Amino acid sequence: MSLQIYNTEKRQKETFVPIKPNQVGMYVCGITVYDLCHIGHARVMVVFDMVVRHLRALGYEVNYVRNITDIDDKIIKRALEKGESIQALTSRMIDEMHADEDAMNVLRPDIEPKATEYMETIKQMIETLVAKGFAYPAKNGDVYFKVKSFEQYGRLSGKNIDDLEAGARVDVNEIKQDPMDFVLWKASKENEPAWESAWGAGRPGWHIECSAMATQCLGNHFDIHGGGMDLSFPHHENEIAQSECATGEQYVNTWMHCGFVRIDDEKMSKSLNNFFTIREVLKAFHPEVVRYFLLASHYRSPVNYSQENLESAKASVGRLYSALEGIVPAEAEKESAFEGAFMTVMNDDFNTPKAMAVLFDLAKEVNKTKSPALAGLLIKLANQIGLLEEEATAFFKSQPSTSELSDEDIEQLIVARKKARANKDFARSDDIRERLGEQGIELLDSASGTTWRRV
RNA sequence: GGCGGAAUAGCAAAGUGGCUAUGCAGUGGAUUGCAAAUCCAUCUACCUCGGUUCGACUCCGGGUUCCGCCUCCA
């Protein structure tokens, strides 16, 4: 079965056909780097990481571009508050973002363009839009896109311009010719970073940078564009308008949008101040547990962040790893029905919950047969969604823990307990088990000896 | 007000016009010095009202509730 992807623009699944055979150009809207990434950002990173991994597993050569917005109002404001230069703030936050990504085992994009490094492309695109009559400079030095000049405006989000105006949630601004028009270039104020342009000193509006970077990196017309659901309007709608008016070509074939992470069934966001940063979460849960949690729901559905749901994810990942304990995996079994099932459900719009069900079925088979080839297959398939990347024992030992016991302390106690058991001194043996249990250390006896895990 | 999405067992979460999703939790059994893991068995479902159908959780229509976007937002 060929790959089907739900295209937000068409509101249905479509068979994926790349523009160039075997190659995929994919652009994902990345982070505005003014603060630490939160778990909602992690979802976008993990979801598109999973998408890229699967596309590559299908044999596609993927060019994955994810931008960094390193100039915008929030950045300017935050830098001022911190008494830090904009450059210092953004480069610090970019480092932090990379650290989070690495911790989450998210593969880096192939290209990570920064808005400030694409200024010439951005200005050229705006000039083209002005020259073609799709945009106009205003008297204050701003440049606006003339929304009504693009007949297909609203095509992605299914909105029509008249309804939007009736809603009247757009900025009232006498400088614009029409309230719907959005800014391409902002004249700079005192003490703001600025780039020289034909319209005076200023900086780009948010939407134009993505159009410029995407087309520069992937061409005027490319395969997949993704991002969080909140970006579909107005950001992606505006990207389509700008790009297609500037280039005269179709911008994107497939639009993918991933759902939100919620807290208590409310959207997690900076403005609601109900967010958890990635590193906070990783203090309490292993990265693969977080990844499992994020992929245990379909990428378009909302997920609810809660202690219970993360605990449950932890138990589930533990089951997969348990199957691998005590087995030396061999080369993955070939032409397995499990692999066929896995690929089939992943090809159905990246159905990771179903893919996980296949992994659990396979884990059960591994538990029964202890087959090294099936264990190898389990690892191979799980790796395709970024799971089971560790050795089982290492995974269980590396769970975030409040215990102050070092690995050495634990090993010593296990040796002591072994002696006690050999002497049939079970009272002492159980005492050690209990003491370790209080420290969040669980002992597992088996024919081959005693292993332990942090719980 | 406009546009879009969703309602599934104790919890989480897929899916299908008739055939066990899956994980966690629960129950019974096997196994175990204890404990865990594992295996076998098993209890809990498809918001509501109509319609289509031999048969609907699944399709169609009405209703209810929830969520998102329409303003910066992943």
Image (cartoon, coloured by chain):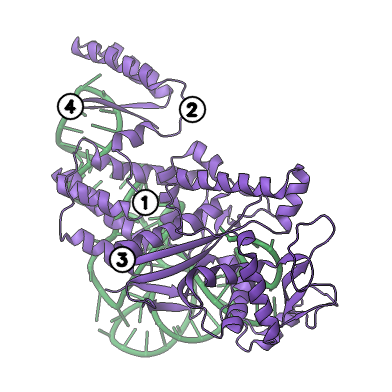
Chain colours: A purple, B green
Residue drawn at 54 percent across, 45 percent down = A278
Residue denoted by label 3: A345
- Across and down, in percent, residue B42 comes to 25, 52
Q: Are marks 2 and 1 on the same chain?
A: yes
**Residue B66 place in picture, x, y as percent:** 60, 64
Amino acid beneath label 3: Val
Please report contact status of discs 4 and 3: CB closer than 8 Å, yes or no.
no
Label ID, residue A30: none
Q: CA distance from mark 3 to mark 2?
A: 38 Å
Q: Are marks 3 and 2 in contact (CB under 8 Å)?
A: no
Residue at 27%, 54% in the rendered image: A381
Looking at the rendered structure, the kind of residue marked 1 is Gly
Q: Secondary structure at mark 2?
A: loop
Q: Amino acid at mark 4?
A: Ser
* Residue occupied by mark 1: A386
Question: Is residue A67 visible to us here?
Answer: yes
User: Viewer-nearest of labels 1 and 4?
Assistant: 1
Q: Nearer the viewer, mark 2 or mark 1?
A: 1
A27 shown above or below A270: below
| Residue A264 versus residue A249 in the image, above or below | above
